[in-house]
Image (cartoon, rainbow, N blue to C red):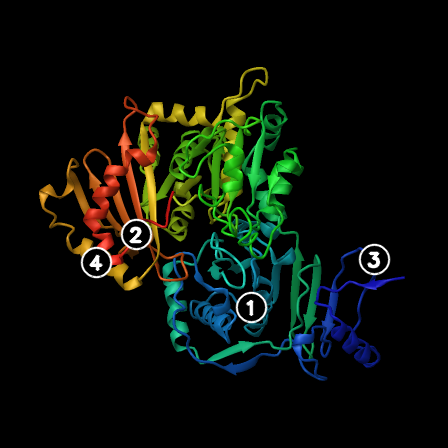
Amino acid sequence: GHEIAMVFGRSNRTLAGLLVLLPAIVAAGSFAPQLVSPGRASSLRVDGVAKLAPSMHLRGGSDPLAATVKPTAPIDGQKPGTSGLRKKTKVFMGENYLANFVQSTFSALEEVKAPVKGGTLVVSGDGRFYNKDAIQIIAKIAVAHGVSRLWIGKDGLLSTPAASAVIRAREGGFKSFGAFILSASHNPGGIDEDFGIKYNCENGGPAPEKVTDLICEKTKTISEIHSAEDFPEIDISTIGTTQVTSADGSKTVTVEVFDSTEDQVAVLSQCFDMESIKKLFARPDFTFAYDAMSGVQGPYAKKVLVELLGGKESSLINCDPKEDFGGPSSPSHGHADPNLANARELCDIMGVSKEGRAITGQDTEPPSFGAAADGDADRNMILGTRFFVTPSDSLAVIVDNSELIPYFQPKKGLFGSKGGIKGAARSMPTSCALDRVCKAKNIPFFETPTGWKFFGNLMDTPKYTPFICGEESFGTGSNHVREKDGMWAVLAWLQIMAAKNPDPSKPLVTVEEICKSHWKTYGRNYYARYDYEGVDLDSAKNMMNRMAEMADKWPADSFGDYTLETADMFAYHDPIDGSVSKNQGIRFIFTDGSRIVFRVSGTGVVGATIRMYLEKYEPNTGDLDQHPLEVVKSLADLALKLADLEEFTGRDSPSVIT
């Protein structure tokens, strides 16, 4: 009438092996399972010879915590990019590929004196193919390096912002020395698609360049992998706590599998007034649609938008996580990237075309609010009825209305803040719309390279917090965690809408009206990005090097109707630690506020992606109702001429325009 609740993998072979061993184990007193009522989670202590996973090679007398040393050799191409290491899934599945990188990370952490031994490590990901296997590999290596506790989200799921929240808030906060986040973010998932891994530090943010550079150096000299090969396979589908003890009883490793939403939702609940948003949801003229794109955000969307705010579950789209994010047959073709090109199911519902134009003639009026997340839920897209909000405008609007959000109100003082926004930042390619808000409101402003890690030092500096930051690549967030946070951005917009719609008897103030009011105050930064994907890396570098060499040599007549103010290769001087990050993109800045930016992206897995950013400023007295692609067309023509892009790459058109 009882069952043994085990937080380890099961199989017929496992059960057969356990039944054979059980009499001897019980007789020896080395295995004492807790008997619990069916349906209850419990702790299970595994001592000495108890092995429950078929892949762990059941051997009498072996030690589940003993480290073994396996020889290996360096593997080329393991330098982390702006968001960790990303390659094709089958590359990661190759012999020692993942293990080499994880071992190199531990070697780097030990060199910088991170508290690995006896420490707590978070390991989870976005649920893409190979996540579950990767968790087992990382766990074994972690145990061999002395980690005493593993925190894993149920089913191996944690959104990237949730992983940061776990580090910063679980059990009161800062109990973990870091996290391995298994994700390739917005890249497609599946055995024939992409996989990724990155390490986040004790502050919950991505490892800084000095750490990722050290990891890279370790991958070039690695000769052995330390792994607890007999550590049992973890059953990540069962919530509960398990202890595994060494054969001599001197060491214990605790494995905790927990609800992946609990820490992130708890943090978000401190940032926003959920009751006021709930009243917005209750309005008969407010409707919404949310698309998780079959990524990890699904459980969070159900918890927040349905259970906490009272929304209809029928308003959720693709909110069941899938290893391939829906695959090639889905509307997004398995590309969980929340933009106009890929989030077509949502955009069609909202009445927005691939070019961001309004689509009319629907049988029913589109919802008043729409949003989408990417695979690991750190990115967001915001839509109104037949209206697309660019990420740059979204960031500027949130900062401009930050006093409507409880976390930024002067009297709240949440998370140790003294109230009121104290700083804001954008990545260099992001439009200058934020700059104008910060200047008008006297908010300290920073321009950083692309990559959320560059916001970390600013967010860790008390005089700049509370802090809001964002990137043109659909990433927005604040210092509540140290990652961009797709759900945070959605709730920020909903909070602003709730504040602007206190009286349900009056017409709804819409997303479009909020944006247009912003433009009438600050002017409009028309903006577009052209991506050239899969370009030969050497060709991309040659193109960038030529423009860098020409920075102060361009003839005055090179720019047509535009007058050049400055051209340079952007370098970032961190105001907190004094570090310098060079070669962060080519900038052409013109006297009328327009800009052209070129950057080679670090988030792809094959070749290089050249991103060309185009921005033209229109003052608040000008024409604010033009279509961005038409406005920036002359800049696009000029940019292609300056870069000589077709000559260097052979490309006569971009892969995608957003």
Q: CA distance from mark 3 to mark 4?
A: 65 Å
The x, y position of residue 61, in whole percent, is 71, 84
Report which residue position mark 3 lands on: 38
- The image's mark for residue 138 is 1
The answer to whether 367 is drawn above or below residue 153 in the figure is above
Residue at left 49%, top 39%?
489
Q: Identify residue type, mark 2.
A: Arg
Q: N-terminal of the two: label 2 or label 3?
A: 3
Q: Viewer-proximal residue, 208 or 452?
A: 452
Q: Which residue is mark 2?
A: 599
Q: Closer to the N terminus: mark 4 or mark 2?
A: 4
Q: Nearer the viewer, mark 2 or mark 1?
A: 2
Pick whichever of labels 1 and 4 is earlier in the sequence: 1
Q: Residue furthest right?
A: 1
Please state which amino acid type lies under the numbered disc 1: Ile
Ranked by sequence position, the earlier of labels 3 and 4 is 3
Q: What's the distance in space between the residues labelled 4 and 2, CA to CA?
A: 11 Å
Quadrant of the image for the C terminus? top left
**Label 3 element class:** loop
Residue 533 coordinates in the image, percent (x, y): 36, 55
Q: Nearer the viewer, residue 182 or 95?
A: 95
Q: Which residue is mark 4?
A: 545
The image quadrant where one finds the N terminus is bottom right
State yes or no: discs 2 and 3 in contact (Cβ < 8 Å). no
N-term-proximal mark, 2 vs 1 = 1
Q: Earlier in the sequence, mark 1 or mark 3?
A: 3
Q: Position of residue 66 (x, y in %)?
A: 61, 79
SS for dot 2: strand
Dot 3 and dot 4 residues touching (CB under 8 Å): no
Q: Nearer the viewer, residue 473 or 59?
A: 473
Which is closer to the viewer, label 3 or label 4? 4
Residue 215 shows in the view: yes
